[in-house]
Image: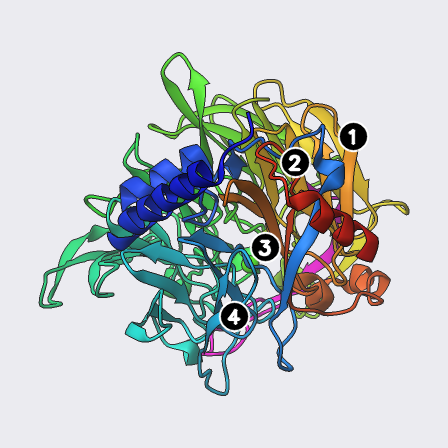
Amino acid sequence: MRPTLLSVLTTLAIGAMAATASHAAGVTDKLIEDSAKSGNEVLSWGLGTQGQRYSALKQVNTGNVARLVPVWAFSFGGEKQRGQESQPLIYGGKMFVTASYSRIFALDAATGKKLWKYEHRLPEGIMPCCDVVNRGAALYDNLVIFATLDAQLVALDQNTGDVVWKEKIDDYAAGYSATAAPIIANGLLLTGVSGGEFGVVGRVEARDPKTGKMVWSRPTVEGHMGYTYDKDGNKKENGISGTTNKTWPGDIWKTGGAATWLGGSYDPKTGLAYFGTGNPAPWNSHLRQGDNLFSCSTVAIDVKTGQIKWHYQGTPNDGWDFDGVNEFITFDAGGGKTFGGKADRNGFFYVLDANTGKLENAFPFVKKVTWATGIDLKTGRPNFVPENRPGNPTAGADGKKGNTVFSAPSFLGGKNQMPMAYSPDTKLFYVPANEWGMEIWNEPITYKKGAAYLGAGFTIKTINDDYIGALRAIDPKTGKIVWEVKNTAPLWGGVLTTGGNLVFWGTPEGLLKAADARTGKIVWEFQTGSGVVAPPVTWMQGGEQYVSVVSGWGGAVPLWGGDVATKVSFLEQGGMVWVFKIPKGGATGATAEAPAKAAKVAKAD
Ligand code: CA
């Protein structure tokens, strides 16, 4: 039946009132959880604190996605391009999207009209290791909160863009920076730190999201003290992380790295926040005999106490810069169990019990792994290939350079910062993987504040002539790659999967692609004009499903990619957010006046 004008107006009015009422109260934990289930809005990084990047929306599906067209695009402008790794947030008809050089924009989500912009004033001498990126913001109450390259947190009024509070995380001159999206967990704002290449001390911090005041801090390097804070900011000891010198020799743990630079995830069912930790510092592993906890690990922190409940270390005594920061995505494993999946930079995919950290399964998700032959499922430890560890420089003839080894994956990883997705429909993970290796060697090094603290040299090498990247659908039960779509350049953007049986991801070559989630058949693609190194999102607005992704080539590959950087040097920078939908008249909920408009769009295209 065709709706009457009155019924349409009434529906619109009720819809508007409902939107106003629910949005006047501001963003809450419950709203974040509800939006993750409905898919109607995008209130957190990861489309829900579990980070599944799954949207239940199915108005856009395998049957009609071919008709998806752009509705607006917005340029971040200025001369500040570089890598754009940001995931937009959608709330109350507004899009909040961060950009390179610590910028954030609020846009009208339906039209792309700019509402406000905030450009953080960055000091000279910031030290981001891997481009001037930002991965997104958090929403809480009436605030939008993001981290900056000079290691600060800024909370802005969602409506005006006015700064409500600003807090320093740490000293940028010592190598600290921040690029991850904060997350909200049980009413707390959780953040990590970047700077593992400068010998910072990794940690997770919890703050009051309304004020920015500290609640607790938990170091991720064994030996450092954790703290809780009272309302006046007085800190109280809350126990050392681990046992001093148990897995680190001498004083080297004091500048031990293990940066929590990709942020974390949170599962309300377990009450635990899951943060991945980066490389132990320095890279030269011979200077720190031992496992070097809690580097290259997943740490599960009880958000109520700020204590580490369990940890699982992927690469003990890492010698390859295998940052274990990758997202830990919890999922319903059946039989009342909650498991988590993690595709580690070291090339192995781990499935752990999310409550206890017990290893349930582990298998490689890339085709070439040289540093270990596998993971012992009983002990949870890798079966190392000792001769694949870069040699000790003090054992060499001149004491200046150890044996060079060829290692795969490269230090840029089987997977890097680009987050994967999990679909509860297909029960598959969709992993943006890369096949590459490196030549790596160790050198002597001593710590100096604010200087690179590696003690290693390296060159990234290609393994296959025809591809580096591969979007892989992986069954966490069997470890099987169900399907894959290869890509010439390394994949560096995240993934979205939907109830419409779709998987969306971007490529450095500029394409946003959609594939059938069950078969991997490409069903749609669009050229965005620059490389996509960011994760797509989707939401509902005015009864229509929108899809969006940020485009703008950059990140670590052009800076550190060696032979691969040369191979992809033709790619151009950018800085643009794209938004797509199916023209009215095609999707469910079509209206009478829309087809003419749709036809116009199609013609212009
Ligand atoms: Ca690192």
Q: Earlier in the sequence, mark 1 or mark 4?
A: 4
Please say if the residues under marks 1 and 4 sit with CB atoms less than 8 Å apart: no
Judging by the rendered image, the residue that carries numbered circle 4 is 114
Q: In the image, what residue type sits under mark 2?
A: Val
Q: Which portion, as a residue range, is magenta?
A: 432-458
Judging by the rendered image, the residue that carries numbered circle 1 is 521
Task: Return the x and y of residue 229 as percentages of the image width and height.
Answer: 14, 60
Q: CA distance from mark 1 to mark 4?
A: 36 Å
Q: Label 4's element?
A: strand
* Residue 446 falls inside the magenta stretch: yes
Q: In the image, what residue type sits under mark 3?
A: Asp
Residue pictured at 46% horizontal, 82% vertical? 122
Q: CA distance from mark 1 to mark 2?
A: 10 Å
Q: In the image, what residue type sits under mark 4?
A: Lys
Q: Which of label 1 and label 3 is nearer to you?
A: 1
Judging by the rendered image, the residue that carries numbered circle 3 is 321
Q: Which of label 4 and label 3 is nearer to you?
A: 4
Task: Return the x and y of residue 184 as percentages of the image width and height.
Answer: 32, 50
Q: In the image, what residue type sits under mark 1?
A: Lys
Residue 49 seen in the current view: no
For ligand 1, give the image quadrant: bottom right
Judging by the rendered image, the residue that carries numbered circle 2 is 503
